[in-house]
Image: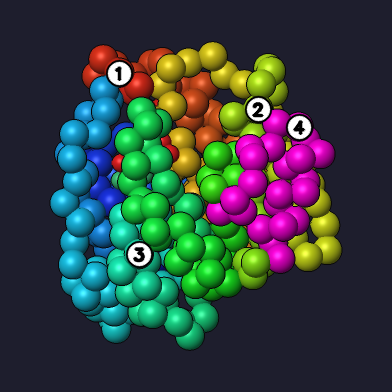
């Protein structure tokens, strides 16, 4: 069965992040990709120049229309932009009974905010409990918890368990911001913690890695039904995508990864 995966996220016209990355990653992982758009960003590989948020009821209507007609096997949530959009998305997903992967997108690689500061509490209090899995990086985890950023593996375990207690069934805490040559991710569920080790790849082309990983994870979760198997497959996919990134020639800033 080819799973139908719905991304609820922003558009990146340069194709490296947002729904454009999501649809490529979903396809490469064996899924059929769909997208309900929360925002039109204006950006290229050098940075974000602006964003037009979509009205919350229009975001929710896109999601409802897809669910009305199509079997949705998993949902991935990316950029939400505002507290009102986050609330509308939570409302329209309530009671749907499908796996939800929440990528708590807050800041673009270049430092531009993609989520209003007052929406972080909505993400934590309303969307986290709805999520099957959540995929924060270290700055996002710190922001969600109001703590300092973890800088050790012990600190990562503590923060992942604290996020788990907020309601999701699994936390994939990404260690890409740790200092050193390794980039280990940590998967924590109610009954286990697993390290997913990886060597860091030296490249400046990392635009859209979070979007790509969370979309791969949603697809693999629909395919396998198993958080650990899904996380391992998604991690292998993003590692290969980053390893191949320098083969692309896209823009002069932080280029995209190779979604193949
Ligand atoms: N979603 C959108 C629409 C974006 O434009 C970006 C970054 O620019 C992101 C998400 C987050 O990107 P990343 O996967 O690099 O964290």
| Local SS, label 1 | loop
Question: Residue 201's image quarter?
Answer: top right
Whichever of callouts 2 and 3 sits on the residue coming sooner in the sequence is 3
Task: State yes or no: discs 2 and 4 in contact (Cβ < 8 Å).
Answer: yes
Residue span colored magenta = 144-165
Residue drawn at the location 41% of the way across and 21% of the way down:
205
Q: How dense is the environment of label 1, judged by Cα within 10 Å: few (below 14), some, or many (20 and up)?
A: some
In the image shown, does 253 or 6 lie closer to the viewer?
Answer: 253
Residue drawn at the location 16% of the way across and 51% of the way down:
52
x, y percent for residue 132:
59, 67
Residue 178 is tagged as: 2
**Circle 1 is placed at which residue position?**
253
Compute the Cα span from label 2 to label 3. 29 Å
Q: How dense is the environment of label 4, judged by Cα within 10 Å: few (below 14), some, or many (20 and up)?
A: few
Q: Is residue 213 left or right of residue 192?
A: left
Quadrant for the C terminus, please.
top left
Task: State yes or no: discs 3 and 4 in contact (Cβ < 8 Å).
Answer: no
Whichever of callouts 1 and 2 sits on the residue coming sooner in the sequence is 2
Whichever of callouts 4 and 1 sits on the residue coming sooner in the sequence is 4
Q: Does the Cβ of the disc 2 residue fall within 8 Å of ligand 1? A: no
x, y percent for residue 149:
63, 38
Question: Residue 245's image quarter?
Answer: top left
Residue 152 is tagged as: 4
Compute the Cα span from label 1 to label 3. 30 Å
Q: Nearer the viewer, mark 2 or mark 3?
A: 3
């Amino acid at each position: 069965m080819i799973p139908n995966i719905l991304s609820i996220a922003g558009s990146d016209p340069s194709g490296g992040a947002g729904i454009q990355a999501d649809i490529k990653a979903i396809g490469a992982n064996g899924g059929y990709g769909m997208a309900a758009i929360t925002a039109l960003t204006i950006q290229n590989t050098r940075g974000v120049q602006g964003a037009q948020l979509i009205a919350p009821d229009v975001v929710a209507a896109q999601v409802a229309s897809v669910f009305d007609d199509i079997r949705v096997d998993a949902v991935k949530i990316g950029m939400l932009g505002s507290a009102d959009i986050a609330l509308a998305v939570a409302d329209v997903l309530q009671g749907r009974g499908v796996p939800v992967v929440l990528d708590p997108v807050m800041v673009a690689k270049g430092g531009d905010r993609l989520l209003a500061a007052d929406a972080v509490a909505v993400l934590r209090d309303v969307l986290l409990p709805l999520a099957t899995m959540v995929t924060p990086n270290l700055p996002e985890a710190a922001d969600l918890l109001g703590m300092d950023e973890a800088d050790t593996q012990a600190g990562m375990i503590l923060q992942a368990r604290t996020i788990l207690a907020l309601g999701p069934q699994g936390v994939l805490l990404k260690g890409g911001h740790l200092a050193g040559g390794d980039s280990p991710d940590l998967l924590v569920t109610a009954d286990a913690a697993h390290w997913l080790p990886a060597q860091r790849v030296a490249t400046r082309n990392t635009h859209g890695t979070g979007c790509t990983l969370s979309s791969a994870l949603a697809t693999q979760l629909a395919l396998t039904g198993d958080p650990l198997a899904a996380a391992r497959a998604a991690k292998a996919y993003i590692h290969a995508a980053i390893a191949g990134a320098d083969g692309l020639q896209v823009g002069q800033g932080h280029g995209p990864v190779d979604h193949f």
